[in-house]
Each structure stands twice: as structure tokens, then as C-alpha cells.
Image (spheres, helix red, strand yellow):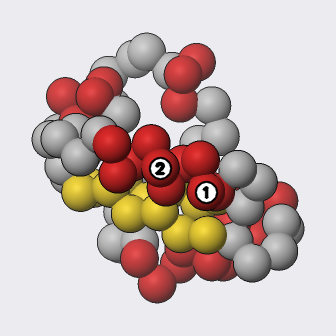
Amino acid sequence: MDWLFAEEVTSVVLSAGYLAPQFADALQRTQNYGGRVLLVTEPDPAGTGGALRYVKAHLQDQFFCSTAIPCLRSSLSN
């Protein structure tokens, strides 16, 4: 997430079903990412489309969706 905030992303919404408690624990231990991080727990796993449905209320007009952030290392500003 450091990379996202370095790219001027101001907030991150994480959708988690599987391993959601572990995500919550990790986020509580690491609160200084440089931006807002919100964890939304999926009540039932529903794939990427379902995850977007659960986080919809927290998204801005412009948003970036990915299931592979560790694979991305390009500039978001281009």
C-alpha cells in the first residue's frame, strides 16, 4: 500500500472475505500507511463483482480495482 499512497492515492478500500480477520489484525498493527485504509468484510464470497457490490458505497466517482496490486509497478498518473 505504500506504493499506492506514493502514487497519490488518497484512500484504499480492501474487500476481504477469506482471511478477513488476519487483514484486520494487520491493519490495526500498521496504521501509518500515509492515507485512509478501510476494510470491508464480505459476508459471503462472491468473486470480484460481488466484492465491488459490497464496497460500492465507499467508492468515489473515480476508482481503481485490482486483485493483483503486488504485480503492478507502473505509474498510476500516466
Is the residue marked by circle 2 packed among few (<14), some (14-19), or many (20+) residues within 10 Å? Answer: few
Q: Quadrant of the C terminus?
A: top left
Name the disc covering residue 78, or none.
Answer: none
Please provide percent x and percent y for residue 30: 29, 40
Q: Residue at the spot x=84%, y=68% of the render?
A: 46
Q: Secondary structure under badge 2?
A: helix
Q: Quadrant of the N terminus?
A: top left
Asked whether, in this view, residue 48 is left or right of residue 21, the answer is: right
Residue 16 point in image, percent of width and height = 64, 58
Q: Label 2 is placed on what type of residue?
A: Asp
Q: What residue is at 83 percent from the left and 66 percent from the top?
A: 45
Write down the residue under mark 1: 21
Residue 48 is left or right of residue 24, and the answer is: right
2 versus 38 height, above or below: above
According to the picture, the residue beneath numbered tag 2 turns out to be 25
State which quadrant residue 53 falls in: bottom right
Whole-angstrom CA distance, mark 2 to mark 1, is 6 Å
Q: Is residue 28 above or below residue 69?
A: below
Question: Which residue is situated farthest in the bottom direction here?
Answer: 57
Q: Amino acid at mark 1?
A: Pro
Residue 77 is at least partly visible in this image: no
SS category of the residue bearing label 1: helix
- Indicate whether 27 appears above or below 13: above
Callouts 2 and 1 close, C-beta under 8 Å? yes
Q: Residue at x 82, y 74 (%)?
A: 44
